[in-house]
Amino acid sequence: MPFESLELREDISISKVVTIHYFEYMSDFSFPGESHNFWEFLCVDKGEVDIMAGDRPHTLKRGQIAFHKPNEFHSLKANGRIAPNLVVISFECNSPAMQYFEELITDISETARYLMAQIIYEARRCIATPLDDPYTTHMERLPEAAFGSEQLIKLYLEQLLIHLVREQMKGRSTAPAVVKSIKQKNDAIIYKRITTYLEEHIREHLTIDEICRANLIGRSQLQKLFREQNQCGVIEYFSRLKIELAKQLIRENHHNFTQISDFLGYTSIHYFSRQFKKLAGMTPSEYASSIKLLAERP
């Protein structure tokens, strides 16, 4: 019996991405406005901003998104009280379904927030141009971009738009059990992404705010996620990673304690020793001696 393939229909297809930004503005920031022949959306991650879409003024608060259709004039300014963090993504799309986004200003769900975070995460893995430069007009590729990152940006962006269209068509009627299942899955993916980020930056001194900015997650959500997974905060988890790597480097016996301390980004050998004893229960010297004794035991 001959098989007949089904050509998959694409209701929304992104042909090009123009810019991907994550901005941290001052509370007095003001952008006079522009218009261009491609789509753009603005989502407030923290704080709030006053925007103009065509001739429509609106105050956009945390967790809200606004779309600007091609050739629509738009501007924004901070309100002087709250410094905003914003996601701004512009792209080309000629799909008829984009009519749903004309003059759209709406709240976003956890699913939409997750998809947006994935776009920012993948952009940092394949785009050399700083994502916080408001004057970017041309994005440069990283010479050694992560495999599949550009394609994932396209897929996550299309999934985000499809998700938003479905919400406009059906409303927020998803069953609570389904919402909980989606949240658990998203939490697991976010947790994995953050732990990978910490491993990749093991040689640096990271703050909670830096981890939040890099992974597009709120401070309280970040801490709650790590306490659920590890019964400790994210900074303590990061310290444990450093000390475990320090143990490995001591066992390899290629570096002295000062070199290991510098390699892992500690400000001094004394602070490194204190952290090591706090988490390992012994000083680096005591650990090295105990490992040596174990190795020499018949």
Image (cartoon, rainbow, N blue to C red):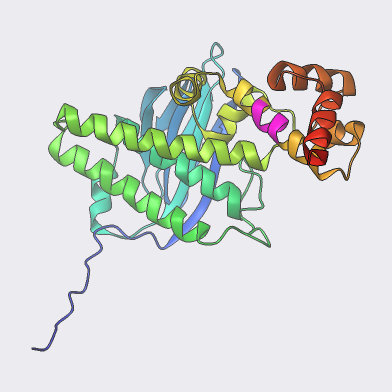
Tell whether 248 sits left or right of 114. Answer: right
Residue 106, compared with residue 97, is above or below; it is above
Residue 73 seen by the camera: no
Depth check, front residue: 266 or 112: 266
* Depth order, front residue of 192/95: 192
x, y (%) of residue 99?
24, 49
Q: Which residues are magenta?
A: 240-244
Q: Residue furthest bottom?
A: 2
> What secondary structure characterizes most of the magenta part?
helix
Q: Quarter-wise, where is residue 282 in the image? A: top right
Q: Tell me, yes or no, whether the highlighted magenta stretch contains residue 239.
A: no
The stretch drawn in magenta includes residue 242: yes
In this view, the residue farthest toward the top is 81
Residue 182: image x %, image y %? 28, 36
Q: Is residue 237 left or right of residue 203?
A: left
Work out whether residue 82 can be spotted. yes
User: Which of these two is toward me, 221 or 59?
Assistant: 221
